[in-house]
């Protein structure tokens, strides 16, 4: 683990860090904050949040940034790694009385150089729709607080919609609104639409259509954050009761659940292909959950306090499915090659990830990069690699992969492909000539190679199974598995493995598994919340203190990553090789990144 040492280093704020891609550097001239640059006294105020939108203007400066600090809301041109921030000229600035902005979200579908639709949630429960370019306030929802009086915790436009948006509150309720409809002058009356294990959904009863269209009541305590899947069909919610709940949004049905190790869950995000969800919270862990298998597949420990934001890096997530990149030479050459391949890889990641379920039997190596920031003022970056993901793929997929690796002559460089992600993880290119698969497996104890191997054997000899997995595990530097007794471990996971597949699709059967979830002591050690020794424990690639105050924002953009702390400073970290970008480069067409 890359934690700092004692003494002065503990309090030293890092201005750069190194990963396998190269050096990320803090750009001091690209810092955004209130115009006076004075640190904000954050006592009792809501977290600083940041939203981005690209308006595709012709100047090449299409990115816009919105952030809240205390009672204030700012809207600037975001110049990123290209030019210094000019804080004297906000496009729009608003100061609110009696309430504070808590969160915001741009509608990317309708954004133009002349107009943007920005939703802003507030601490007293209202939601405002504003246009910071036209400097208009078009509508205020829940104005009289008749719908919900509690703080707005998260607001997002429904993917693909120009008018629908979803709002969650500290009450544990979530509401679906349409910007075209009014909220009415009286408190809404509701009619039950659907009810399930610890959730219910109501429609609004009225003669004419009014907001809210739907009211979701989810779990117990505050609903802290939600996130739509990349295809917009599913919704992941994390609550103060410690549960991740994933819903089919249109069908209003529960797909699966997961329980934190302890305490509330505060943040959630989806992988670019929608196959994995990462959640973080008051247990100081990041937890990786498989959408397909409905179970925890890994936990990451690096933070020393609550995890406030998790986000996937779409631009560093990589898939290798044909000819591998073969690296030779020095580490410097290796970094140069990584930078060279970076942009192509980023642009095609989404489409290539979507192909992973095809019947193509070629070995695929995938590395998901995600990051987290926390109240410990630290930034952690994590790699989720094939050796964690591979044991948990469906059995038919495992068979195909195993047979390709062992029963037939592999395609050129197949074993190298399998190791690409792990070689790059530790920046070591010595693995280009990997020994035969079976020779690798003999160095690995069975209990460390695959937690669920006993359960997924099903007609495949354990030797073949172990050797296939060992290929991925052998050079993975950032994974540690707890030592455990082999017999007890196998017996445990035969039971859990079968439960996982029973619950994968049927919400009725899933409810049988979740009856005990009100008592944390009863959920520990079940499919909902495995014990620490029962799942792989990831260690961060880097873990760096980057602020004096707790961190509240982490966003990955194409040329940089953006962080923010509670003092109101929004920092831009240039990606390797992106520091010296010329201002003449046209960046208008670049995606604006993922806001989580």
Image (cartoon, rainbow, N blue to C red):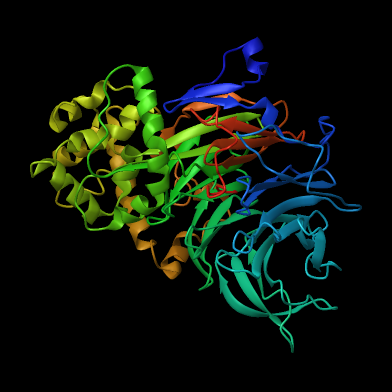
Q: Is residue 326 above or below residue 149?
A: above
Left or right: 43 in relation to 438: right
User: Residue 448's x, y, as percent?
Assistant: 30, 32
Residue 132 placement: quadrant: bottom right
Residue lying at 38% horizontally and 25% vertically, measured from the top left? 336
Q: Is residue 56 above or below residue 192?
A: above
Q: Residue furthest toward the bottom?
A: 207
Residue 530 placement: quadrant: top left
User: Residue 301's x, y, as percent?
Assistant: 51, 32
Q: Is residue 122 above or below residue 9?
A: below
- Residue 364 visible to an observer of this rendering: yes
Residue lying at 27% horizontally and 26% vertically, measured from the top left? 327
Q: Is residue 143 above or below residue 592?
A: below
Q: Residue furthest toward the right?
A: 97
User: Residue 492's x, y, as percent?
Assistant: 34, 45
Camera-side residue of 174 and 557? 557
Residue lying at 54% horizontally and 71% vertically, measured from the top left? 252
Left or right: 89 in relation to 340: right
User: Residue 439's x, y, as percent?
Assistant: 14, 27
């Amino acid at each position: 683990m890359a934690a700092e040492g004692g003494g002065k280093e503990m309090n030293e704020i890092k201005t750069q860090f190194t990963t396998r891609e190269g050096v990320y550097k803090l750009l001091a001239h690209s810092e955004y904050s209130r115009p006076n640059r004075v640190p904000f006294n954050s006592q009792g105020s809501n977290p600083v949040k940041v939203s981005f939108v690209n308006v595709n203007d012709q100047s090449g400066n299409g990115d816009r940034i919105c952030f809240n600090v205390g009672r204030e809301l700012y809207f600037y041109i975001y110049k990123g790694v290209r030019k210094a921030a000019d804080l004297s000229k906000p496009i729009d600035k608003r100061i609110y009385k009696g309430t504070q902005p808590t969160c915001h979200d741009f509608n990317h579908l309708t954004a133009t150089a002349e107009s943007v639709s920005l939703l802003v949630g507030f601490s007293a429960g209202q939601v405002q729709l504003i246009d910071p370019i036209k400097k208009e306030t078009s509508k205020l929802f829940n104005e009289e607080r008749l719908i919900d009086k509690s703080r707005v915790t998260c607001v997002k436009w429904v993917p693909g919609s120009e008018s629908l948006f979803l709002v969650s509150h500290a009450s544990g309720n979530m509401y679906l609104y349409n910007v075209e409809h009014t909220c009415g002058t009286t408190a809404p009356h509701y009619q039950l639409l659907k009810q399930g294990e610890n959730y219910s959904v109501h429609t609004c009863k009225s003669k004419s259509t009014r907001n809210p269209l739907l009211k979701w009541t989810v779990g117990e305590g505050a609903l802290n954050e939600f996130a739509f899947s990349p295809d917009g069909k599913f919704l992941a919610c994390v609550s103060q009761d410690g549960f991740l709940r994933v819903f089919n949004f249109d069908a209003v049905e529960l797909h699966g659940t997961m329980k934190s190790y302890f305490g509330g869950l505060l943040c959630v995000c989806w992988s670019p292909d929608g196959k994995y969800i990462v959640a973080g919270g008051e247990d100081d862990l990041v937890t990786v959950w498989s959408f397909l298998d409905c179970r925890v597949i890994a936990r990451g420990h690096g933070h020393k306090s609550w995890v406030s934001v998790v986000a996937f890096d779409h631009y560093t997530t990589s898939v290798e499915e044909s000819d591998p990149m073969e690296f030779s030479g020095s580490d410097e050459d290796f970094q140069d090659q990584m930078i060279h391949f970076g942009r192509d890889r980023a642009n095609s990641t989404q489409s290539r990830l979507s192909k992973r379920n095809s019947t193509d039997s070629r070995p695929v190596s995938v590395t998901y990069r995600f990051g987290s920031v926390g109240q410990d003022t630290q930034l952690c970056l994590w790699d989720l690699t094939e050796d964690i993901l591979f044991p948990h793929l469906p059995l038919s997929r495992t068979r195909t992969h195993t047979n390709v690796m062992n029963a037939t002559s592999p395609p050129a460089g197949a074993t190298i492909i399998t190791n690409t992600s792990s070689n790059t993880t530790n920046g070591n290119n010595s693995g280009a000539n990997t020994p035969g698969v079976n020779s690798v497996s003999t160095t690995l104890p069975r209990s460390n190679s695959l937690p669920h191997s006993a359960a997924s054997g099903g007609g495949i000899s354990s030797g073949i199974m172990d050797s296939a997995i060992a290929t991925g595990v052998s050079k993975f530097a950032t994974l540690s598995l707890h030592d455990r007794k082999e017999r007890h471990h196998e017996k445990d996971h035969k039971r859990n493995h079968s439960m996982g597949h029973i619950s994968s699709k049927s919400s009725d059967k899933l409810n049988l598994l979740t009856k005990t979830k009100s008592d944390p002591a009863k959920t520990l050690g079940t499919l909902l919340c495995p014990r620490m020794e029962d799942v792989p424990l990831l260690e961060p690639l880097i873990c760096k203190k980057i602020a004096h105050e707790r961190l509240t924002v982490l966003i990955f953009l194409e040329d940089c990553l953006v962080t923010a702390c509670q003092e109101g400073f929004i920092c831009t970290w240039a990606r390797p090789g992106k520091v010296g970008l010329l201002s003449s480069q046209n960046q208008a067409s670049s995606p604006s990144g993922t806001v989580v």
